[in-house]
Each structure stands twice: as C-alpha cells, then as structure tokens.
Image: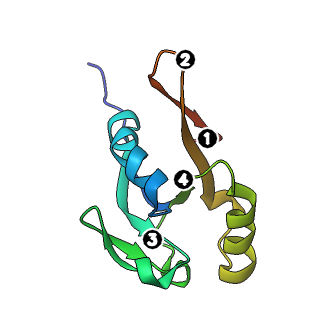
C-alpha cells in the first residue's frame, strides 16, 4: 500500500496590480500548482480594494496567515522587498520574486528565486 504524501498549499499574495500583473496573472495560476493566491498587495492606495476578483491588501494589512509574498517584477524587486522589510516588518524569507520573460519563439518562460 502506498501512502499518499500530504500536499501543503502555500497561501500567497501577489505584489503588484499594474499592467505587468494583468499580463501574467493567468500564467501564474496555470503554471504554479500548490499555490493559493489569496489576493494582491500594492503600495498605491488607489489600487486597494479588488483586482481580478480578489482582494488587494495594503502592505500593512499582510498578516501571519500569508506564507509568501510574490513580487511580480524584475526591475523593482529589491526596492519593493526592502520597503516591505523595513516599513512593514515582513520577514525576508516570506518574499519571493517570480517573473515571466518572452522567449524568442513567443512563449513565456517562468523565472523564479522560489524555494517552494
């Protein structure tokens, strides 16, 4: 008899609600199994409320129930990460960077520093 392994679902918040987030949100859902995207987070208070049918958190609202914060950016990753750590006291090990890049043949490739 083979015992099944318990699969741990990681609760994540995606940081970013701009055009880049709009372009890759569906790709993340399709390519990353084991993630429960509970909402988004953004520094801009104009974007708080709802995005893609999910809640948009202010950074100070992120609580212990969130396992990871995934920053949807390659260009501003360090700046965003530093702000989350310094201003909002988010532990560094909760912050990940995932981004997609166009390949020569037009398919998007996933790049990550994730250790899920």
Mark 4 Cα shell of 10 Å, populated few (<14), some (14-19), many (≥20)? many
Q: CA distance from mark 1 to mark 2?
A: 27 Å
Q: Nearer the viewer, mark 2 or mark 3?
A: 2
SS label for mark 3: loop
First in sequence: mark 4 vs mark 3 = 3
Q: Which residue is mark 1?
A: 115
Residue 47 place in picture, x, y as percent: 42, 77
Query: Can you say which quadrant of the picture contains the N terminus?
Result: top left
Q: Which residue is mark 2?
A: 104
Instruction: Name the residue at 24% across, 65% down.
Output: 53
Q: How many marks?
A: 4
Residue 6 place in picture, x, y as percent: 36, 40
Determine whether 57 is above or below 34 in the image.
below
The answer to which of 19 and 86 lies nearer the viewer is 19
Q: Which residue is mark 4?
A: 72
Q: Quadrant of residue 113?
A: top right
Q: Nearer the viewer, mark 1 or mark 2?
A: 2
Determine whether label 1 and label 2 are within 8 Å by CB: no
Label disc, if present, on residue 65 of the rendered structure: 3
Q: Quadrant of residue 34?
A: top left
Q: Is residue 67 left or right of residue 23?
A: right
SS label for mark 4: loop
Residue 106 in view here: yes
Q: CA distance from mark 4 to mark 1?
A: 16 Å
First in sequence: mark 4 vs mark 2 = 4
First in sequence: mark 1 vs mark 2 = 2
Instruction: Name the residue at 39% across, 34% down.
Output: 31
Q: CA distance from mark 4 to mark 2?
A: 21 Å
């Amino acid at each position: 008899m083979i015992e099944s392994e318990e699969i741990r679902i990681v609760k994540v918040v995606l940081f970013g609600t701009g055009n880049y987030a709009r372009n890759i949100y569906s790709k993340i859902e399709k390519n990353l199994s084991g993630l429960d995207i509970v909402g988004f987070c953004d520094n801009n208070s104009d974007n708080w409320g709802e995005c893609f049918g999910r809640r948009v958190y202010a950074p100070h609202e992120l609580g212990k129930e969130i396992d990871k914060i995934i920053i949807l950016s390659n260009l501003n990753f360090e700046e965003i990460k530093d702000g989350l750590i310094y201003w909002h006291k988010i532990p560094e090990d909760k912050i990940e960077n995932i981004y997609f890049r166009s390949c020569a043949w037009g398919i998007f490739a996933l790049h990550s520093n994730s250790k899920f």
